[in-house]
Image: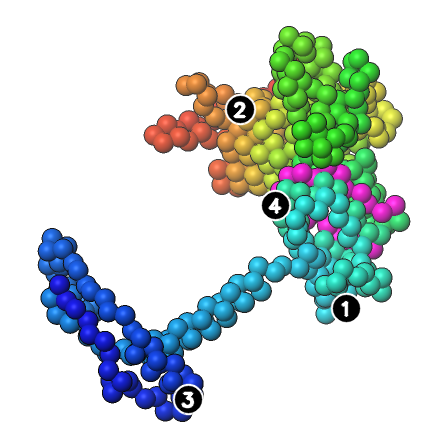
């Protein structure tokens, strides 16, 4: 056991230019310093020394290299450093809600939106300063790629009349987004019940991920009752969307995923037709990048006349069960299942006349089990159908054969394909290559 003696005044080290009050406080602290002991059990005495560290001195007086005055100075320095660190951390945590950028030509665009909390409704039309004031002399002309990125609170976005450029990338992974409202005066874009199109209706740009929640509020079931309505939560009192769908025990369900004692097959089919079916208008020639990424849809109807499906056009839309194409005599503008009865004809999978399938276009679409590539297709991007084949309960499911309309010779000669375009299944040591049936006839 070692005993430390009280420090002597004469041991205090004087620091040049040190304030007198610090020296006085240090001397008083030295006079009042309490005695303490170092008591280390024998079994805990180090048997080795780490390079750079002083060896323990058991049974000896602790070295008195540092006086209380030095310790006070060190503490002051540490406090200043910690305060500066906290200040910088707080500044780093501050992120502007709207981050606008100005181009060299003087125009403005939205670079990013950062939700400050639980903002549900956002309007992008004019420059907004840090105090939240709009400047109508500075209209916003573009929503940059990933301007809204992985937001899980915003349910509605209103886009101003001056916006000239946006895409599905602008709303990437907006999990709660139900509706995009485009100003009617915008000459470049429009929306059809919250789904974004170019003004000429030749490209469908973006289908909101959570659009089905909006549809549940605006559609009625077979009994004439809305699937959901806005009301107050019985427990919390908060206003929210209340689902009128309940399980067999009477508990509220967000949505319906199968039949039960309460919901038979007829009810379930009607629900899927009204809520999880989408008819792309006949004027559309292109499905944009990331247009239907992550959406909650079961059936998609594509008009014959679509020439291109952009990269990640249907990426990870695993709830899609069927892709169907259709022909028409009169223009189809209705996007609901009601339009189906007005088709001239319809057939399975992708439309004749399609020319380009983008990269990762159908990746992870595990709900489908049939895919037909028309002979008209001239380009298929990398991993276009990746992971549409998968294993479940020891059984391979999904797309297990790729049907191609062109002969093998014509396909290899005329169609440019990216790496790993086929839905190859790989899991640990299991590898399953999907067969390609060239010259295939489309299933009825």
Determine if the magenta segment contains residue 96: no
Q: Secondary structure at mark 2?
A: loop
Q: Residues within 10 Å of mark 2 (few under 14, many from 20)?
A: many
> Residue, x 61% and y 40% (percent of image)?
312
Q: CA distance from mark 3 to mark 2?
A: 83 Å
> Residue, x 81% and y 35% (percent of image)?
193
Task: Say whether residue 31 is visible.
Answer: yes
Q: CA distance from mark 3 to mark 4?
A: 57 Å
Q: Nearer the viewer, residue 286 or 160?
A: 160
| For marks 2 and 1 on the same chain, the one whose residue lies earlier in the sequence | 1
Using the rendered view, name the quadrant where residue 211 is placed. top right
Q: How many marks?
A: 4
Q: Where are the magenta residues, as a range?
A: 162-184
Q: Could you tell me which quadrant the C terminus lies in?
A: top right
Q: Is residue 138 left or right of residue 118?
A: right
Q: Residues within 10 Å of mark 1 (few under 14, many from 20)?
A: few
Q: Nearer the viewer, residue 294 or 313?
A: 294
Q: CA distance from mark 1 to mark 4?
A: 29 Å
Residue with the mark numbered 2? 399
Question: Residue lying farthest front?
Answer: 32
Q: How is the image coloured?
A: rainbow
| For marks 3 and 2 on the same chain, the one whose residue lies earlier in the sequence | 3
Residue with the mark numbered 1? 106
What kind of secondary structure does the magenta stretch mostly adopt?
Answer: loop
Using the rendered view, name the quadrant where residue 40 is placed. bottom left
Q: Secondary structure at mark 3?
A: helix
Residue 62 locus on image (x, y percent): 18, 71
| For marks 2 and 4 on the same chain, the one whose residue lies earlier in the sequence | 4
Residue with the mark numbered 4? 150
Determine if the magenta segment contains residue 170: yes
Residue with the mark numbered 3? 20
| For marks 3 and 1 on the same chain, the one whose residue lies earlier in the sequence | 3
């Amino acid at each position: 056991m070692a005993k430390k003696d009280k420090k002597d005044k004469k041991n205090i080290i004087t620091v040049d230019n040190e304030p007198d009050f610090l020296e006085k406080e240090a001397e008083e602290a030295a006079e009042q310093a309490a005695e303490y002991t170092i008591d280390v059990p024998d079994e805990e005495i180090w048997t080795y020394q780490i390079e750079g560290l002083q060896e323990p001195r058991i049974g000896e007086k602790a070295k008195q290299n540092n006086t209380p005055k030095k310790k006070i100075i060190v503490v002051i320095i540490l406090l200043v450093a910690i305060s500066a660190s906290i200040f910088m951390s707080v500044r780093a945590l501050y992120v502007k809600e709207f981050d606008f950028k100005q181009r060299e030509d003087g125009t403005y665009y939205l670079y990013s939106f950062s939700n400050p909390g639980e903002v549900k409704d956002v309007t992008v039309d004019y420059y907004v300063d840090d105090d939240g004031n709009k400047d109508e002399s500075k209209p916003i002309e573009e929503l940059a790629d990933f301007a809204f990125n992985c937001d899980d609170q915003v349910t509605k976005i209103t886009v101003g009349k001056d916006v000239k450029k946006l895409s599905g990338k602008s709303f990437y992974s907006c999990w709660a987004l139900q509706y995009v409202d485009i100003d009617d005066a915008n000459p470049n874009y429009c929306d059809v019940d919250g789904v974004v199109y170019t003004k000429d209706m030749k490209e469908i740009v973006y289908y909101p991920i959570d659009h089905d929640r909006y549809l549940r509020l605006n559609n009625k079931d077979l009994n004439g009752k809305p699937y959901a309505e806005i009301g107050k939560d019985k427990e919390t009192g908060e206003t929210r969307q209340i689902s009128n769908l309940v399980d067999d025990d009477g508990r509220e369900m967000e949505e319906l995923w199968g039949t039960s004692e309460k919901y038979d097959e007829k009810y379930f089919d009607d629900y899927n037709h009204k809520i999880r079916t989408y008819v792309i208008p006949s004027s559309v020639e292109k499905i944009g990048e990331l247009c239907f990424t992550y959406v909650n849809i079961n059936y998609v109807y594509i008009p014959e006349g679509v020439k291109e499906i952009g990269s990640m056009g249907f990426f990870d839309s695993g709830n899609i069960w069927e892709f169907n194409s259709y022909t028409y005599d009169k223009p189809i503008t209705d996007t609901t299942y009601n339009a189906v009865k007005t088709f001239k004809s319809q057939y399975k999978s992708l439309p004749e006349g399609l020319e380009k399938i983008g990269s990762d276009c159908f990746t992870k679409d595990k709900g489908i089990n049939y895919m037909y590539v028309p002979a008209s297709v001239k380009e298929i991007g990398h991993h276009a159908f990746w992971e549409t084949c998968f294993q479940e309960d020891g059984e391979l499911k999904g797309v297990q054969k790729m049907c191609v309309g062109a002969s093998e010779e014509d396909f290899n000669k005329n169609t440019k394909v990216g790496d790993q375009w086929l839905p190859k299944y790989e899991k640990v040591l299991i590898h399953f290559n999907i067969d390609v049936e060239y010259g295939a006839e489309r299933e009825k």
